[in-house]
Image: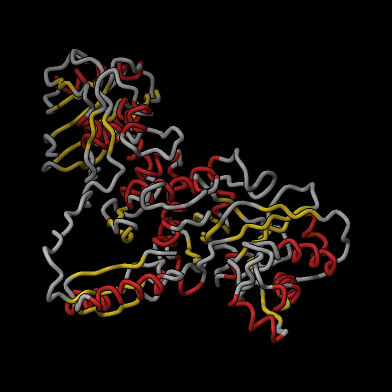
Amino acid sequence: MNTVLLDPSAELGSSEREPLSAPDSLDGLTIALLDISKTKGDVLLDRIDVHFTERGLKTLRFKKPTFTRPAPLDLLQEIAQRCDVVVEGLAD
Amino acid sequence: MILPDGLIAVVKRDCPTCVLVEPVLQAIENANHPLTVYAQDDANFPAVKQCIDDIDLEVSFHLKVETVPTLIRVAGGREQARVVGWERGEWRALTGIDDLGENLPAYRPGCGSRSVEPGIAEQLAIRYGDFHVASRRIDVPPLEDDIEYCFERGWSDGLPLVPPTEVRVYRMLQGTHRAPAEVLGEVPPNLVPLTIEKVAINAVMAGCKPEYLPVVIATVEAALEPAFCLHGLLATTWFCGPMVVVNGPVREAIGMNWQGNVLGQGNRANATIGRALQLIVRNVGGGRPQEADQSTFGSPGKLTFCFAEDEDTPWQTLGEDGGFDRDQSTVTLFTADGVQGVVDQKSREPGALIDSIAASLRTVDHINMANAADAVVVIGPEHGRVFDEALWSKAKTTAALHERLQIPGQDLAMGTDKSPAALPVAASGALVPKFRAGGLQLIRAGGKAGLFSAIIPGWLMKGPLGSDPVTKEIHA
């Protein structure tokens, strides 16, 4: 008789998540620049902000309270409501 | 199951008492009493009309037979009375046949039922009982080594696992009163709901005994408290992982170690409880090294890091610090890097020993870093004796360490590229605390010989923006 094992893994959780497709163009979209509170993340995002703004794109700035935890729900909802794409600063 | 009315006997040929009562069963039948006999090992024994094969033990299991022969009187489909073994008076009373077994000895004890033999009982409970687990059953292909198979599935932390068979998981779940389907919370990083069942499966793989399961459950509950911030802890580039400290009567009950080699190998409970937590992070949460776990170095403690506190000292215990009594068992979780030894074989009074330990604590994270990670200091028995003989409590000792760990601002610049952040402090000449208030935790443990203590620094991200220690009571 074969040995039968019980699966110790999540199994019910999705192991893969389908990413949203990237937009063809950023024209007319609102871009969230999300600082996750890692040191110097703001420096990176400041530079990106300049480049986007020079191209006439609209940006909004957001910040997570700490990089150690997932973003609070209200922050996620605000970004989802006000923006079309997100750039996160994962720098350290 | 619906029982046939009349008398039911459960027997096995392997039992001399069952063989002894064969003529008695025939006599019952001859007296026109409805009799159904279930045979556990030989469908042709005994020689009666209604002898039913119960070699698969389903009826024996449902009747909860522990001894053969067992004789049961049934009316209206319900059991009215039972006797076990051979006791002439009892059999006569149950059957109402006054001359039953006249030629037999008055009494013979029965034998153990096959249904309660070790290894069989668990299989019957799984097959016929109310053992319901939702986890997927995975068939290990024939001729495949089951331990190697666990490696190939990606379940292992690098060391061999105990394959989580149904029988082992069933036994593990006997260690708790809680239902397998109960959800304890969501395990990061994938935020997957964690059931008691998945805890039990991973505890089996870690090598836990069923009596450790309540400790593992409390450990997981503590780890999933938002204050502990397991998500950030498992993902960080820093060295740390969770460290479990156990207090209270459960330490002795399950044979944990708080003495020699307390932070090392060799004790099953210490080794496997900490490992179970990390396997849950890996297998349920999906936190794997070089994936979500981005630790630069990690540490050996990320395989397992669990020990018990020595409570045979004058100091308040860690459990008491958490507001529990000594007769309550608790787990407390810290974030922890590796172990840094402190040797002082000369100080014979507490002030000097504080100087030594404080000097060593200065190096946590960086010697010129203030507001560093929290740290646990495990005070060994020989160092502890210095404090105890001077009647220094834990609170007094901790306060003395904090007092000794005020760093002059001018010492705070790191490296050659003097940190601009430190300059205003340096200029002010202020003293800056090395550790935040509450950031030093003293624990008593270790072997009798050695004038040593052990510093265990935690995660750089402490407090509300990172992790705080969490204490949970252990319930059966």
Image position, residue B130 (x, y; %): 23, 44
Q: Please indicate whether residue B413 sits to the left or right of residue B102 in the image.
A: right
Residue A18 drawn at (x, y percent): 16, 54
Locate the N terminus of chain B and report the quarter of the image it occupies: top left
Residue B388 locus on image (x, y percent)? 80, 65
- Image quadrant containing the C terminus of chain B: bottom left
* Residue B6 occupies quadrant: top left
Q: Residue at x 43, y 60 (%)?
A: B223
Task: Tell me: residue A43, above or below residue B312.
Answer: below
Percent across and percent down for residue B34 are 12, 28
Q: Which of the two residues, B45 or B243, is positioned nearer the viewer here?
A: B243
The reply to whether residue B87 is visible in this rendering is: no
The image quarter containing residue B458 is: bottom right
Q: Is residue B476 above or below residue B257?
A: below
A22 sits to left or right of B336: left
x 23%, y 15%: residue:
B42
Which residue occupies 63% across, 84% down? B424
